[in-house]
Image: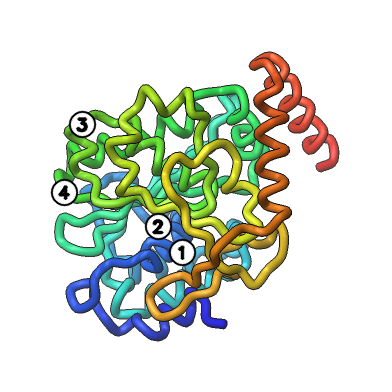
Amino acid sequence: MADIFDYISWRGDLTFEQDGFNELDALVLSRLSYLPFDGAVSSCLFDEITLEQAAMRVFSTDDYEKNLLWKGDADLLKATAESKRFGKILVSGYVNEVESDVSMQFSAITFEFLKKNYFISYRGTDFSLVGWQEDFNMFFTFPLPSQKKALDYFEKAVRMLNGKFILGGHSKGGNLAVYAGAFTDENSRNHIDYIYNFDGPGFSLDKIRDSGFYEIDDRIYTFVPQSSIFGMIFEHEESYTIVKSNQKGFLQHDVYSWEIEQNRLVRLKSTTNFSVFFDHTLKEFVESLTIAQRREFTCLLYTSDAADD
């Protein structure tokens, strides 16, 4: 079956003026946030270069391959940079911060795909131990340091760029996108067209009830593969779409395995029994623990993984 590389091949010669922004564009740009743009793209939102230029800078770095997070990322950057649709997108505002003292891993980048129309892409978890520890901390800490960073990044972009925004991300990046939209002020929220969450975890209900989540839930598009694990953590008050992956189990988290048809992801009617079982079992287990017990449990998980490494 076809994948996002086929989409770039099929639609890559059409500009966004010719064929409007769609969910596969959001998926592509969400994955691009994982690329090592350090030194290639400025952190300044006004200092824009094209994606084609950014790719040339990345590939001119001798050790760029060691900083790639997923198989296929280099091919994705090359394919998008060479396409008419993505190559001339303007890129800016790249930040990549890891702070071990507060267990925070945060990275984001801004794409201007049409004049004054921006896609903010939040990176999911990288390979750092800090990034994984922050994921574990999600069970007992709210908001996470990266969630605060995501909100600050978006509100800064609204103040400086004053355009229309689409927020998105894969994995933890999807959670950050939803958090930024739900917890921002009303003025900033009015600048949001859509939010795309690709297999990112939800939120505890008690956390979102006091936010602006329900003012924006009809603009949130959440996608999970049929055996989703990470994306089914916590609650999704928004509706979500189940998509088809050609992988099994945890490997379905890889967006390169998601199947497409034309300009959309292939839909399925339900998740697998394994995903349902994991979802219910994990939620029941977490809800049975106090905050202190959750902290102790996740610390044990983290120290165990660190020892194995």
Residue 75, x across and y down, in percent: 52, 74
Q: Compare marks 3 and 4 and give the one earlier in the sequence.
A: 4
* Label 2 neighbour load within 10 Å: few <14, some 14-19, many 20+: some
Q: Earlier in the sequence, mark 2 or mark 1?
A: 2
- Local packing at callout 4 (Cα closer than 10 Å; few below 14, some 14-19, many 20+) is some
Crowd band around label 3 with a 10 angstrom C-alpha radius: few (<14), some (14–19), many (20+): few
- Residue at the spot of label 2: 40
Q: Amino acid at mark 3?
A: Glu
Q: Are marks 3 and 2 in contact (CB under 8 Å)?
A: no
Is the Cβ of the residue at disc 2 closer than 8 Å to that at disc 1?
yes
Tell which circle, 1 or 4, labels the residue nearer the N-terminal end.
Answer: 1
Query: Which residue was labeled with disc 4?
Result: 163
Secondary element type, mark 1: helix
Instruction: Check contact, mark 2 vs mark 4: CB within 8 A.
Output: no
Closer to the eye: label 2 or 4: 4
> Which residue is disc 3 drawn over?
186
- How far, Cα to Cα, is label 1 from label 4? 28 Å
Say which residue label 1 marks.
58
